[in-house]
Image: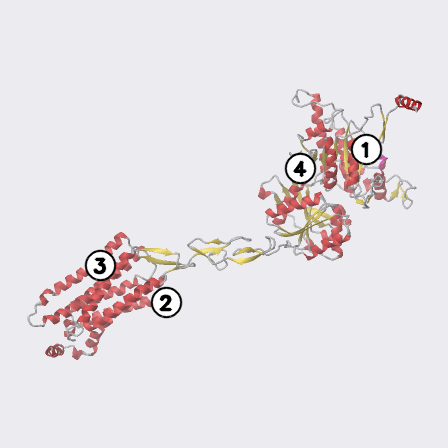
Amino acid sequence: MILFRMLLMVVLTRKGETVCRLRGGAQQPELAQNGDLIIGGIFSFRTGQDYFTDTFQSIPNFRKCNNFNFREFKFAQTMIFAINEINTNAEMLSGVRLGYKIYDNCGTMDILRAALSLVSGLKDEIVDDGCIDTESVQAILGHSGSTPTIAFLHIVGRFQIPVISHFATCACLSNRREYPTFFRTVPSDYYQSKALAKLVKHFGWTWVGAVAVDNEYGLNGIVAFIQAAEEYGVCIEYSEAFSSSDPTHVIQRIIETIKQSTSKVIIAFMSHREIKILASELYKQNITGLQWIGSDAWITDSSLTDSKGHTILLGSLGFTVAKANIPGLEEYLRQLHPSQFPNSQFVKDFWEGVFDCSLNETVNTQRQPCNGFESLQTIQSEFTDVSELRFTKNVYKSVFAVAHALDIMIKCNDNKEAFSNRSCFDPKNIQPWQLLQNLNSVNFTTVDGEKVYFDSNGDSPARYELVNLQMTTTGIMKGETVGVYDASFPEGQQLIMNNISVAWANGLLEVPVSVCSKKCLPGTYKVLQKGKPICCHDCMPCPAGEITILTESLQCLKCPPEYWSNNDRDACIPKPVEFLAYNEILGKVLAICSLLGIFLTLITTLIFFTYKETPLVRANNSELSFLLLFSLTLCFLCSLTFIGRPTEWSCKLRHTAFSMTFVLCMSCVLGKTMVVLIAFRATLPGSNITKWFGPVQQRFSILTFTLIQVLICVLWLTISPPFPFMNLELYEDRIVLQCDLGSDTGFYVALGYIGFLAVLCFVLAFLARKLPDNFNEAKFITFSMLIFCSVWITFIPAYISSPGKLSDAVEIFAILASTYGVLFCIFLPKCFIILFRPEQNTKRHIMGKTVKTDLQY
């Protein structure tokens, strides 16, 4: 045993070659080129895969990838083209040559395997004393998908190797704490989601469905869209997610959801694989009329035309990066030949597939051998088409971003004084973490004028083109640019539509409608439906006096006090002004009654004046009669001041004129009553009372009674006069023009004084009612005062309770009724005798009755 141990030690300590071997073997790149500094690339030239579940009872093998993805292969060739341009540019990376290692993998697990190979840089077996010979990369370009990128970033980031993606748009990758080494030359989905939300709002779609791929890209994108959409009042009817590997019943469930939904717009945040599956199933079930809004991952994918049911997607709208031009790229792509990449199996398969020939007869006996004269110069294919270099340009910018960062570091070494504030690096030994620091300061302009830089989150400026999938004359579905979106513009100017007609789903000529409820037009407001999103509502008309002038109003606005809503409730119009006018029936009737009263009073005056020398007129104190008739005329006239639009002067005049004319009238009636009483007392033996109440005293009493009322009115006008005002509280829908009394006390004192004189007249006339009929008017004055008092007693409650212009009408009615009562009761009997009983209008007749009456006493 001891001898065996010694022999083993000799063998182990024997000088020899040290061999490092990788467990499990290393994956070889699909395309590679040596250089002083290596840039790695991860693309998926084949995207289809036969899915199965690993049991992990053995080391998982590489999964076979199916079909071709020419766009991804073009990405890789663009990377090579850019590296070749840099290597031949004497102004960049002087003395340093870039190399590349490009991997072709599909499926997240194999993409992760490729990333680990780029990080390690080791081959299958390395013979070296130190066992440290590696070919580590300075940066990794790719991948196109967000989910695979997220998967390998967690590992690659630990080695401080920068990863620059041209297509991974998941907003989650902007998280600098989780992904500190990630950069991208494509805008974040955060901006795309906001752009999509603004697009939906722009076309008035407030009720949409959302379908996403079931991974970080789709779920994060759709969540960001929903958050942005809520800010613009857009509601999501449903939100579904699936992946291309899901079983059939999952797809059918989503199809059924779409079929049962009422929304006609669908936001699809997914890749071209998932949208093809969805479009195919919808086509099979003949579900049409849907307006698709696509994410940049599929909206411009040219392979959609080859899928079954692609016509379902015609008219789709979506944002994608702007078109670009890369000079010389088309010539480079057309010069591709398998001899340039002898170790690439994909290039061989690509060549055989394009020209339908076999490079090796033993491999594919069904195809004719290639004759060696095949060339991409003579054919048109998706690979050589450079008419829409969108994400391809991002690959180009990614390579140049790395080159500019390296150039900054290398030029520091050439001119230390100019770059004294920066650290200097060995051009042949630049570490990835050093490059990572300098990528943050990259800022350059491409040949076509586009600025390239990264913000604090490693994101590029957000600028998109809005494309519309239209069918060309050749039967190919192609994206037509119909607008642009630039996040750097002011909020209301970020989305700009071009003057290009949009092709809508199902060939519609007008913008399709997708709302849960119709828009509430001006004049109505929204009332949310219980248990439903805010986009589902009922439209209720605004109450009277309130309006809405905008669509989709949440509440109605009250009109200003002097305005009222129109019948449509969409505008405030001036309230109609109401007052007792001459052009309305009530005003006309009252005016006619006033004029009729004036006419009758004038006729009565004329009769009395014509027969002023007759005994009947002389016996009834003609002077007081004429003054009474004059006051009655004024009473009829003052009623007209209550009709018409109230003004400052009319308001002052109507109440004061009414008060003074009625006092004058009552003074005359009171004078006539006292004359009757005194005349009777004067016939009694020994009475000399007539000398105390002669014509002078009568005039003085009338003047005194009237001056008292004048004084009351002057005080009223001085302290607080009546004034016109607009009564806005009486009615909601109209304005009542009225005369405010100014001082209620002044009005009621003046009215009370008139009432006092009327009552006094009534009492005196009542006391004189049994005096000789031929010498007094007591019973007629009694009737007139009874009418007068009855009218004005009922006037007060009627005036208080009458609204608006009716209060003026009530006051006019009271004036006319009381004035007519005085006119008819006092003067009508006399006029009747004068005109129709002249035999009674004699002194003998009057004196005869007097004697007879005296004899009775």
What SS does tag 3 mark? helix
Task: Judge the density around disc 1: few (<14), some (14-19), many (≥20) Cα neighbours within 10 Å.
Answer: many
Q: Residues within 10 Å of mark 3 (few under 14, many from 20)?
A: many
Looking at the image, is mark 3 or mark 2 nearer the viewer?
3
Q: Nearer the viewer, mark 2 or mark 1?
A: 1
Q: In this orientation, which residue lies closer to the viewer: 318 or 663?
A: 663
The image quarter in which residue 58 lies? top right
Q: Amino acid at mark 1?
A: Ala
Which three-letter amino acid code belongs to the residue tagged 4? Asn
Q: Is residue 238 visible?
A: yes
Q: Residues within 10 Å of mark 4 (few under 14, many from 20)?
A: few
Q: Which residue is mark 2?
A: 585
Viewer-proximal residue among 767 and 539 = 767
* Residue 543 relative to residue 277: left or right: left
706 shown above or below 117:
below
Question: Quadrant where the C terminus lies?
Answer: bottom left
Residue positioned most to the left: 686
Which secondary structure type mostly characterizes the magenta part of the structure? loop
